[in-house]
Image: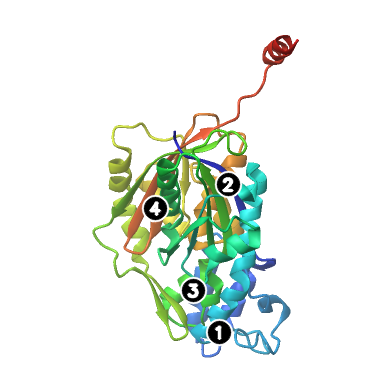
Amino acid sequence: MTARIVSIGTAVPPTRIAQEVARDIFAAQEGADRLTRRRIQAVFDASAIAERHTVLSEFVTGPTSVRAAFVDAEGRLLSPATGARNERYIAAAPELTAAAARAALADGGIDPSAITHVVTVSCTGLFAPGPDYRLVRDLGLRPTVERCHLGFIGCAAALPALRVASALTASRPDAVVLVVCTELCTLHLRPSNDPQQIVASSVFADGAAAAIITADPAAGFPGGLDLDRFGTTLTDEGETDMVWTIGDNGFEMILSAEVPRIIGREIQGAVGRFLGDDAAPEVWAVHPGGRSVLDRVEAALDLPPDALAVSRAVLRDFGNMSSATILFILASLLRDDAVPDGARVAGLAFGPGLTVESALMTRRRPAVATADDVALALAASA
């Protein structure tokens, strides 16, 4: 049986920051010269992001004695040590992870006791016992649930996580797998005059998304997204253009201006090899690493202007939430009545390497009972 995504749940922190407010916070950083302020304004304004969410509520409410590590009394961004950032991750990530998981369970009609496996994903914090353990405890899952964690894969990680879940269902037909991606990217923002740090600061945000995957047709509500196949491509260049490392003052992102151009050059070949002789899919779910990434993918694949509308809407409303973002896009497609039964959906996500992760899915809608179906059922029960 083919594994399917039964449902997807999403969650974001309650603190929402308009992009122009975030821009002004970064432009007001100590030591920013006129050129830096002009660069910050240009990059933030060109991002195609309207607002983002963050676990750092002090950006809106102002600092307290507990939170003074991240902003000063004037609301200017500070640069706390990695330990302080990770402490906030440990405090905030489990609750957001559980919220997304509960939403997926409720939307899919899955009882927590049915979960057999948990796959967690994150590249923005570390602790043990980790998010996988906390999910078992916080959701009241069975203590025998098998767990694994995919860490530090970056923005592309959700598709490998779905691939792992699909493989688990192939080895155990009754498996019901809970996949959760949780990323608190804003914990690692920092004041900087570096153009690459400014670009990263303009796009990254916080969020969590969970998916329920099973090959058991009797598990959960019918319909969803069939997981047909997956693919991975390493590009010929880009190893030093998208890099994610741990530094003394948080996790450090290198995001060069070459990333959109590399994706634009490589994506046609990567998608061509993945699809093979198959016709082009009807629906596209492309990770919005940034507006320029979407523009390059659209142009290189010669897609119609509205093909990436959902990806652009998620970028506009939530920013780049790293691995969770592609699941936000798939969640929107699952709710979209315009996506017909049998429509093929191509998922694309990009991570350090540069790595292109691909997934081909098929939309499955539950059968709608007709008047004749009801009449036959009544006759059979008479």
What residue did someone put label 2 on?
A: 331
What residue did someone put label 1 on?
A: 84
Mark 1–mark 2 distance (CA, rounded to whole Å): 33 Å
Which is nearer the N-term, disc 4 or disc 1? 1
Q: Amino acid at mark 2?
A: Ala
Residue 141 at x, y percent in the picture: 61, 56
What residue did someone put label 3 on?
A: 126
Choose between 180 and 155: the one closer to the eye.
Answer: 180
**In the visual, does 193 lie left or right of 107?**
left
- Mark 4 or mark 3, which is nearer to you? 3
- Mark 4 or mark 1, which is nearer to you? 1
- Mark 3 or mark 2, which is nearer to you? 3
Q: Amino acid at mark 1?
A: Ala
Q: Which mark is residue 44?
A: none
Which is nearer the N-term, disc 3 or disc 2? 3
Which is nearer the N-term, disc 1 or disc 2? 1
Quarter occupied by residue 217: top right
Mark 1–mark 3 distance (CA, rounded to whole Å): 12 Å
The relative height of residue 351 versus residue 88 in the rendered view (above or below) is: above
Mark 3–mark 2 distance (CA, rounded to whole Å): 26 Å
Q: Secondary structure at mark 4?
A: helix
Question: Is mark 1 in CB contact (under 8 Å) with mark 2?
Answer: no
- The residue furthest right is 382
Q: Secondary structure at mark 3?
A: loop
Indicate the quadrant containing the N terminus: top left, top right, bottom left or bottom right.
top left
Residue 365 at x, y percent in the picture: 58, 31
What residue did someone put label 4 on?
A: 296
Question: Is mark 4 in CB contact (under 8 Å) with mark 3?
Answer: no
Q: Secondary structure at mark 1?
A: helix
**In the visual, does 97 lie left or right of 121?**
right
